Amino acid sequence: MSFLLRAIASSLVFFSFNAFAQGDAAAGQAKSAICAACHGVDGNSVVPNWPNLAAQHEPYLVRQITLIKSGARPVPEMLGITPGLSEQDILDLSAYFSSQKTAPGVADDTQVQLGERIYRAGNADSGVPACMACHGPAGEGNPVAGYPALAGQHAVYTSNMLTRYRSGENWGEKDANSKIMNGSAAEMTDEEIQAVASYIQGLYLAGE
């Protein structure tokens, strides 16, 4: 299946999964204490190993937490947390974190040139696609297609995820988006991964 067809298929699955999902941000804030230790009280993690959740698209958060709870996306650190979350809890937490603002990040000046080139144009010689084709020119993502916002994400977390995608890790046949990332990262060098991760960290997404 071509990249375009996989993207369309994943969009349809993603949209149908979240079409009727509704969360209560106020209720989510009241439930968020269990998340704060790793992800921060407002979704801005102070530990770069753990992802920022602030301003992330609500449907994307619902999808990922559900995948983690089901075991399709293995996150050992979440094993003691997700089993106790109901479907409504997941919706409420996702609504809360998506309503928060990201904290500005800083890119490494020595990596900006390469990082921006990969993010905006990819590497035609090796077949690495431009990140912004799916994640937007400002890292805003595409909630309808299920592509997450990246702006301001910790470089440590992003580089770790890209390395794992490059190795072939994904969330199974039913999650086309993670499989797309396998192909996107397959030919990236360590240098390119580090540079684009740093560039992404320097992007800023204010949220709503």
Image (tube, grey):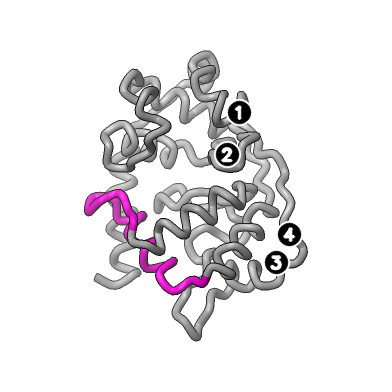
Residue 130 in the image: x percent, y percent? 52, 70
Q: CA distance from mark 1 to mark 4?
A: 23 Å
Q: Which residue is mark 2?
A: 52
Q: Nearer the viewer, residue 101 or 191?
A: 191
Please report contact status of discs 2 and 1: CB closer than 8 Å, yes or no: yes
Q: Quadrant of residue 85 in the image? A: top left
Q: Quadrant of residue 192 in the image? A: bottom right
**Residue 111: which disc?**
3
**Which kind of residue does numbered mark 4 sit on?**
Asp
Tell me the SS state at disc 1: loop
Q: Nearer the viewer, residue 197 or 164?
A: 164
**Residue 40: which disc?**
1
Q: Is residue 19 visible?
A: no
Q: CA distance from mark 4 to mark 3?
A: 5 Å
Q: Nearer the viewer, residue 201 or 138?
A: 201
Please report contact status of discs 2 and 4: CB closer than 8 Å, yes or no: no
Q: Earlier in the sequence, mark 3 or mark 2?
A: 2
Please report contact status of discs 4 and 3: CB closer than 8 Å, yes or no: yes
Side (left or right) of 94 relative to 15: right
Relative to 92, does residue 59 appear above or below in the rendering?
Answer: below
Q: Which residue is mark 4?
A: 108
**Which kind of residue does numbered mark 2 sit on?**
Asn
Q: CA distance from mark 2 to mark 1?
A: 8 Å
Residue 52 in the image: x percent, y percent? 57, 39
Name the residue rendered at 58%, 36% in the picture: 54
Q: Earlier in the sequence, mark 3 or mark 1?
A: 1
Q: What residue range appears in magenta?
A: 169-189
